[in-house]
């Protein structure tokens, strides 16, 4: 973890005190920060660099660089991400707090998800029990139902790295793989181990709307464009783009249940071919003890034909999901 002293100072971001770097990518750094006004306790700030730093300039922005860089492209993408997030309001979606910019950076201020990425929890626990997987995937699905059916938005980048969580206040650590309430007494204090017996993992939140797209106008409930003049391929397009999220949901569910993704190959070409053909298996011995209804649900999502693939309503009505209505999981 980076020390406080090593964190950079960003111009125009005086309202917040950066506390820790939480993630970094090619163009963005995400920090945990304190809101000095006290309006929010803590926030996450996604700092996006406006231009690729030119190494020959020693990290200093060259005056000519601004002219060369296709500023409008990057800008339009960031503004779209922010514009979409502004319109969303759902407990399982990271909410936007604030947006501003300086000469070199955009600042996207977000609701903090202190638990970090779901991805890290899968790595830590190897895989999730069916109960814990259901507890997680239902929350993701509820957010997708809101996006697809209410907000008219497709996410297009659903994956464990973009699923964050707000952990329940205290979960006693148990064995590496959570089993149930019976091993609660074996608790090691202090370590966070999500488990159904201990009340789940907390609240899952979808993040990263950097690739997302508006498919229809949420005001008029019609496809984007003039009402009555919409071509059938646009209407179909809308359906196909939703099914992209459903495929990804299937990949996430598969990964939660067994701990590895449905499609993998060291060669990108081979991997692409496997995906195109929908070539995956319920690999033995890892899938041997996973229930048939769980496998059935996964297979309805990892269906190559988007017309046959489950949509969000069908997903939520599947017996394996509806099981969640049974009183197995105590409310946190
Ligand atoms: P990118 O477009 O670079 O993938 P993301 O929005 O996915 O940007 O953020 C990158 C990473 O930063 C995430 O995978 C996560 O680890 C962390 N992060 C982003 N937003 C938050 C948040 N609100 N709370 C906690 N961590 C976050
Ligand atoms: Mg991301």
Image (spheres, grey):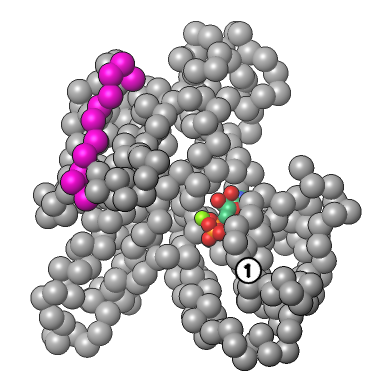
Q: Is residue 203 visible?
A: no
Q: Is residue 125 above or below residue 206?
A: above
Q: Is residue 257 above or below residue 275?
A: above
Residue at point 31%, 54% (across, down): 245
* Quarter holding ligand 1: bottom right
Residue 277 at x, y = what percent?
18, 46
Magenta segment: does it hold 84?
no
Residue at point 54%, 80% (across, down): 75
Direction from residue 128 to residue 68 in the image, left or right: right
Mark 1 crowdedness (10 Å alpha carbons): few <14, some 14-19, many ≥20 = many
Residue at point 46%, 63% (across, down): 209
Q: Is residue 243 above or below residue 54?
A: above
- Looking at this view, is 36 or 256 the one in front? 256
Residue 66 at x, y = what percent?
65, 87
Residue at point 37%, 45% (across, down): 267
Say which element carries label 1.
strand
Task: State the image quarter where residue 258 is shown.
Answer: top left
Q: Main secondary structure of the magenta part?
A: loop
Q: Is the CB of mark 1 within 8 Å of ligand 1?
A: no
Instruction: Tell me the magenta residue range.
Output: 275-286
- Looking at this view, is 318 or 77 the one in front? 77
Residue 280 at x, y = what percent?
24, 36
Q: Which residue is mark 1?
A: 48
Residue 230 at x, y = what percent?
16, 82
């Amino acid at each position: 973890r980076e020390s406080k002293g090593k964190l950079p100072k960003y111009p125009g971001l005086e309202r917040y005190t950066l506390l820790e770097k939480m993630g970094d990518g090619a163009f963005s750094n995400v920090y945990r920060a304190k809101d000095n006004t006290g309006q929010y306790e803590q926030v996450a700030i996604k700092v996006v660099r406006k231009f690729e730093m030119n190494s020959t300039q020693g990290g200093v922005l060259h005056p000519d660089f601004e002219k060369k860089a296709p500023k409008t492209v990057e800008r339009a993408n960031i503004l779209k991400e922010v514009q979409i997030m502004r319109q969303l309001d759902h407990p399982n979606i990271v909410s936007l707090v604030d947006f501003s910019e300086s000469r070199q950076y955009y600042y996207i201020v977000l609701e903090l998800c202190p638990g970090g990425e779901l991805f890290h929890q899968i790595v830590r626990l190897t895989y999730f029990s069916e109960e814990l997987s259901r507890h997680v995937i239902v929350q993701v699905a509820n957010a997708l139902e809101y996006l697809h059916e209410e907000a008219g938005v497709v996410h297009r980048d659903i994956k464990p790295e973009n699923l964050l969580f707000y952990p329940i206040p205290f979960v006693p650590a148990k064995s590496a793989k959570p089993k149930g309430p019976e091993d609660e007494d074996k608790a090691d204090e202090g370590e966070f181990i999500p488990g159904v017996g201990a009340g789940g993992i907390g609240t899952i939140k979808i993040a990263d709307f950097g690739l997302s797209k508006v498919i229809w106008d949420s005001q008029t409930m019609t496809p984007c464009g003039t009402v009555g003049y919409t071509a059938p391929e646009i209407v179909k397009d809308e359906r196909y783009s939703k099914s992209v999220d459903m495929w990804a949901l299937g990949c996430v569910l598969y990964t939660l249940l067994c701990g590895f993704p449905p499609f993998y190959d060291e060669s990108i070409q081979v991997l692409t071919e496997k995906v195109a053909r929908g070539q995956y298996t319920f690999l033995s011995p890892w899938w041997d003890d996973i229930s048939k209804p769980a496998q059935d649900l996964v297979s309805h999502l990892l269906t190559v034909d988007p017309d046959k693939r489950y949509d969000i309503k069908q997903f939520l009505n599947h017996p394996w999901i509806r099981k969640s209505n049974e009183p197995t999981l105590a409310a946190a």
